[in-house]
Each structure stands twice: as C-alpha cells, then as structure tokens.
Amino acid sequence: MKFLGIDLGWSSGASGLCCLELTNGQLQLLDLDRRESIADILAWIDTWVQLEEPAIVAVDAPTLIPNATGMRLPDKLTHKYFGKYHAGCYPANLSLPFAQRTVDFGLALEARGFNHAPEITPQMPGRYQIEVFPHPAIVHLFQLDRILKYKKGKLAERYLELLKLRRHIVDVLSTLEPALVLSQESCQSSEIPPTPLKKGGKIPSITSHKRIQSVLNSDRHASLTLASLKAVEDQLDSLICAYVAAHWWYWGLERNWVLGDRTSGYIVVPAPLPVQAANLDGARVLRPEN
C-alpha cells in the first residue's frame, strides 16, 4: 500500500510531493519532489501509483468546498479545537480565487479512482483521498504546545522552526505505529538544498546546530534564502501529509479525528493518546480522556 502526500499550491507555485510505501509493517520513503503545474503533479501520481494499484492520497488543500461564502465546517472546527495551538486553518469558500483549482484537483483524483474517505475500514486496500492539514497533525504527532512557525517571520527564525520539524520527523515518526524508517543517508544533515530535491527519497537537509549561530547573526547567510527554505518546507509538509494518510489507513477512527464530513468537507487529524471516541459539535472525532 502506498501513501502520497500533496502539499498543494492553492493558487500557484510549486507543490511538495511525497510517496511512502508500507513494506513488512514499516513505512519506507520512496520519493520527495516538487512540481509546478497540476498536470505535472498528476503525472507524478500516475508514475508512483499504477492504474488500480491501492493507495491513499492526502492533500493539504480544500478539495471539497460546498459553501459559496464564509467558512466550511472543518475550517471552523480547526479554530475551535486547535486555535490555542495557533493551528486554525485558512477559510475556504467558492468565491475565493483558489477554490476552482483545489476543487478541480480533488475531482481529478476522483477520476483516477481515488474516492473521498472521511470513513474508512482500517487496513483495507483501496484507492482513497483525504484532506489533511499539517499544523494540527504536527501538534498531535509530536506532542507540541503550539505549532512550529516555519511559514512566517524572519528567515533565521523560520529556519530554526524547520530544523525542529525535520528533527521531529526523523526522531519521532520512527517510534510510532506505523513507523517511518529512514535510511542513514536520508537523515544526514548538511546545507539546505538551494533547489528543490528531484529524486531519490531523501529528507531535505538542514544545517546542523553548529551552524545556527552564524545564521542568526545575518539573514544574508549564503545558505539561507527564501527559495531554499520554501523548497524544504514544501517537501517536509508533503511528508507529514503522507504520514497522516498512512496513519488514517492503518488505524481509522481508533487513533484519528475527522473534523466534518463528506457533505460539509472534512479534515483528518491524528489523535493524541490515550483516546476515546466522542462526538463534538459536528466533528466526528476521537479526543483525549479528561
């Protein structure tokens, strides 16, 4: 079974892409990439998942938008349950410029047989798609008090937050079930790549702690550019998306929350442990015991 993560560029720009595969009970990283156009993203999907091959595609974008204005139910629920972590999502409605692009992407996945799966039988092979949101997933998977703020702020500050994200991915996801097993080569630290990673399934590298002070001293550090940070950000976000896909397929509602439903739109978020089933104001979710 394969698990694809798509950190979709909502309006334009490159999208981060990740492919994981479950082999002998462990997740292996097959590819990390970035693509610009929707056609290229779909071609990448077709390359990694053959016709009728089972897989689940997790998209960080609103692929179901039933409302003409305002906010979707899942958007409201992220603010309700994750606002204290600064993890509420951007509102989506059909009047916004990105809506046609993101909805059409979901339809293109459906045309390939990837059906929406706000409900799932755990570990049942099939072709599915889900909407995900990395920020609340990161909060729960890594037991954080707030999101990692690698998307806004000074370059040096964003750099440090990306470094934390990469270290959590390497150190924590290998301890969870299903475990993401990364090769030593994938985990090596060096300079942030100045261009998007093309092939080979390596985690985008970020400078080790020994170099942090020089980065903090100047935003003009040679290895630290907005483009290089964005390239790493897109790929790491796509890896989180792919892991959430695997976690949803592996556990279903036993260890995941679903904010919303097929009609109103939904977002799948890994639940913290220990958990118990609950229904909370329109969110069919699992939540921690009080």
Image (cartoon, rainbow, N blue to C red):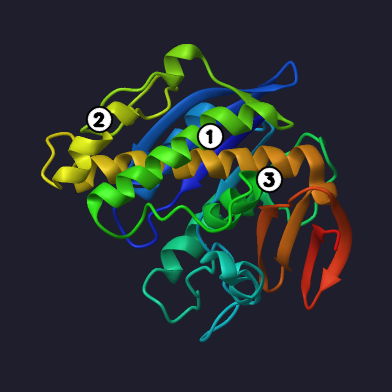
Q: Quadrant of the N terminus?
A: top right
- Residue at the disc numbered 3: 128
Residue pictured at 41% horizontal, 56% vertical: 149
Badge 3 amino acid: Tyr
Badge 1 amino acid: Ile
* Label 3 – label 2 distance at C-alpha: 42 Å
Nearer to us: label 1 or label 3: 1
Q: Residue 119 in the image: x percent, y percent? A: 80, 55
Residue pictured at 74% horizontal, 31% vertical: 177
- Check residue 211 in the rendering and tell me which mark sits there, or answer none: 2
First in sequence, mark 1 or 3: give its number: 3
Instruction: Categorize mark 1 by other alpha carbons within 10 Å: few (<14), some (14-19), many (20+).
Output: many
* Label 2 – label 1 distance at C-alpha: 20 Å
From where the camera sits, is residue 281 visible? yes
Q: Residue 261 in the image: x percent, y percent? A: 73, 67
Q: Residue 60 in the image: x percent, y percent? A: 51, 54
Along the viewing direction, whichever of 133 and 102 lies nearer the viewer: 133
- Check residue 169 in the rendering and tell me which mark sits there, or answer none: 1
Q: Secondary structure at mark 2?
A: helix
First in sequence, mark 3 or 2: give its number: 3
Q: Residue 255 in the image: x percent, y percent? A: 80, 47
Residue pictured at 25% horizontal, 30% vertical: 211
Is disc 2 in contact with disc 1, using a CB cutoff of under 8 Å?
Answer: no
Compared with residue 96, is residue 127 higher up or lower down, i.e. above or below? above
Along the viewing direction, whichever of 242 and 95 lies nearer the viewer: 242
From where the camera sits, is residue 113 visible? no
Q: Secondary structure at mark 3?
A: strand
